[in-house]
Every structure is written in structure tokens, then in C-alpha cells.
Image (tube, rainbow, N blue to C red):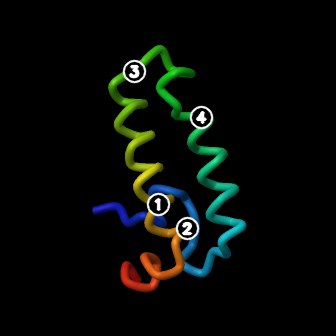
Amino acid sequence: MKTHYDVLEISKEATLLDIKKSYRRLALKHHPDRNNGSAESTEKFKEISEAYTILSNTANKRQYD
């Protein structure tokens, strides 16, 4: 099973800036509007967004880790 770190393609030691950069890069790549509403891209985008929501919040990240 993929972790949120795997989804964002970052290490567990990533800084908040690293998390934001990776999220932005992957969100732009997999955004449904850029991929003609592809179901696969939509699902991947949801995974990326969920991982970012958890890892970008210090309290949520601490609980997740």
C-alpha cells in the first residue's frame, strides 16, 4: 500500500516547502482538466490532494507519522 509520502514522491524527512513543491508539480501533471477528465487522472489527483492535506498540516502529519 502506498503511503502519502509515496504518492507525493517525497521522503519522510521532506520539509513543508518540499511537500508544497511536489504537490504543485504532481497536481499540475494529473489535474483532470489537463487530461480531458480521464478517470485515472481524476483518481490520481484525489490521492495527491489527500496526501497534501495530511502532510501539509503539522498536527495531521505528526498523527499520520
Gap between marks 4 and 2, in whole Å?
A: 19 Å
64 lies left or right of 49: left
Of circles 3 and 2, which is in front? 2
Q: Is residue 44 above or below residue 56?
A: above
Of circles 4 and 2, which is in front? 2
Q: Is residue 61 above or below residue 4?
A: below
Q: Earlier in the sequence, mark 1 or mark 3?
A: 3
Label 3 sits on residue: 38
Q: Earlier in the sequence, mark 4 or mark 2?
A: 4
Gap between marks 1 and 3, in whole Å?
A: 22 Å
Give the residue type that dot 1 points to: Thr
Give the residue type that dot 2 points to: Ser
Q: Is residue 46 above or below residue 4?
A: above
At 39% from the left and 31% from the top, the residue drawn is 42
At 60% from the left and 81% from the top, the residue drawn is 13
Pointer 4 and pointer 2: residues touching (CB < 8 Å)?
no
Pointer 4 and pointer 3: residues touching (CB < 8 Å)?
no
Badge 4: residue crowd in 10 Å (few <14, some 14–19, many ≥20): some
Q: Secondary structure at mark 4?
A: helix
Pointer 1 and pointer 2: residues touching (CB < 8 Å)?
yes
Label 1 sits on residue: 53
Badge 2: residue crowd in 10 Å (few <14, some 14–19, many ≥20): some
Q: Earlier in the sequence, mark 4 or mark 1?
A: 4
Pointer 1 and pointer 3: residues touching (CB < 8 Å)?
no
Placement of the N terminus among the 4 image quadrants: bottom left
Disc on res. 29: 4
